[in-house]
Amino acid sequence: MTEGMTVGPTAFATKRTLVTLSHAMERAFDIAEQPISSPALVLGLFQRREYFDVEVARYAAMAAAGTCVIVGFAGSTQGLPPGVHAVAFAEDDPRSREWVLIAIKGAYASSLVATDVRDLAPGEMSLEAARLFEARWTFQRLPALADAQQKVEALSADLSDAVRSTVAGIIQESVSHPVSVAEAGLGVAIDHVLTSLDASYQRSNRLRAAMESVQAQAERDALTGLHNRHFLERFLGGNDRPTDLVAMLVDVDDLK
């Protein structure tokens, strides 16, 4: 029943962007209506066990509420909450480079599929936030269901027949809901807004990194690499800032 479904184009995104998207998807999932006869699905690939441990309480609560929860990561699956179906990856397994969140509940579905490109985006305040991924995301139901089907198939060898059957039923039930004009239009609009915001955010990061580089060059002596008067004036911050200042005069022989 998912034949003809297509996924969207990919773009480069930082980990900070992926976290923002994941939280948006989770909030939408929380308020989506769920018929009693059709359990929900949340599928998440976290790269490493320690990344999942940050979210484990939330996933335990979803599993306890009857959601079919599937997670995957490199690391041990020991000690996971009841109802969380886990798949362990080897460190060199390509799946351990993926960040995935797929959420389905009745007529609601969204997906985020990203692969770590092992590079850093400029301008971020930390290395973790700057991690760069090739990603695609959508709040449109049919493309999200196509992502779900693909990822479950990729994990099928590590999932029980019962889990695969449950997921197939969830996807089939979601497909059965007719797509209204409002749903289709809203999904396209959300995807466009999120893509535009991410592009603007990355442009501002590049501009900030360039400005910081120019500022650093302007505040250091090109010969010695020491801070100059421009840096001192910025550091002092004007006359209103009380500052204890020590001046040291050093004479270096033969320094020209």
Image (cartoon, rainbow, N blue to C red):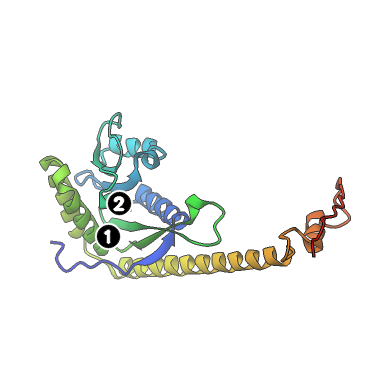
For label 1, the residue is: 144
Neighbourhood count class around disc 1 (C-alpha, 10 Å): few under 14, some 14–19, many 20 upward = many
| Residue 227 horizontal/vertical position (percent) | 75, 58
Foreground of the two, 215 or 113: 215
At a point 32% along the width and 65% down the height, the residue shown is: 183
| Residue 156 horizontal/vertical position (percent) | 15, 48
For the residues bearing labels 2 and 1, Cβ distance under 8 angstroms? yes
Relative to residue 59, is residue 139 depicted above or below?
below
Residue 142 is left or right of residue 17, and the answer is left
Residue 187 is left or right of residue 239, and the answer is left
Determine the image quadrant of residue 160.
top left
At a point 24% along the width and 59% down the height, the residue shown is: 147
Secondary structure category for the residue under label 1: helix
Secondary structure category for the residue under label 2: strand
- How far apart, in angstroms, are the residues tagged by discs 2 and 1? 8 Å
Determine the image quadrant of residue 88.
top left
Residue type (three-letter) at the residue carrying disc 2: Ala
Q: Earlier in the sequence, mark 2 or mark 1?
A: 2
- For the view shown, which residue lies furthest in the top direction? 79
Neighbourhood count class around disc 2 (C-alpha, 10 Å): few under 14, some 14–19, many 20 upward = many
For label 2, the residue is: 103
Residue 204 is left or right of residue 90, and the answer is right
Residue 105 seen in this snapshot: no
At a point 42% along the width and 51% down the height, the residue shown is: 23
Residue type (three-letter) at the residue carrying disc 1: Ala
| Residue 251 horizontal/vertical position (percent) | 85, 54
